Amino acid sequence: MQIPKAAAFVLAVMIASTAGLADDAPPIACDDAAVNAQSAEAFNAYCARCHKAKEVAGGWFGAGQDAAARERELATFLDRHSACPHRHHEDIATWLRQLSGSP
């Protein structure tokens, strides 16, 4: 009977000691599969005739760059580059950043 009590005590201490860590850690970005699918479809519909997604992603998002700033710049560029009235530019920019492997 002593072993289960000891194990329960150790487990409770471990859980209590790690509970505060979750509050300090930055949130983990989760990919939304539906948004990614829509973004890929939008890229294929509007961009793929002239551009390859992996080439654009790799060329736009390089090592040592501020990925969030580059993502905003890409969305702005797409707004000016495209004559289409759709609102997928931000989603495409996010998808390409994720495709590049940038954080």
Image (tube, rainbow, N blue to C red):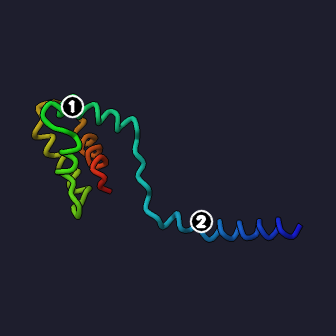
Mark 1: which amino acid?
Answer: His
Tell me if 4 is positioned left or right of 88 in this view: right
Q: Quadrant of the C terminus?
A: bottom left
Residue at x 43% of width, y 55% of height: 28
Tell me if 4 is positioned left or right of 31 in this view: right
Q: Is residue 14 above or below residue 35?
A: below
Q: Choose top left, top right, bottom left or bottom right for residue 63.
A: bottom left
| Furthest residue in direction top, as rendered | 45
Spatial CA distance of label 2 from label 1 is 44 Å
Residue at x 59% of width, y 68% of height: 18
Report the residue marked by disc 1: 86
Q: Position of residue 71 (x, y in %)?
A: 23, 51
Mark 2: which amino acid?
Answer: Ala
**Which element type, helix, strand or loop, lies under badge 1?**
loop
Q: Position of residue 62 (x, y in %)?
A: 21, 57
Q: Choose top left, top right, bottom left or bottom right for residue 26.
A: bottom left
Report the residue marked by disc 2: 19
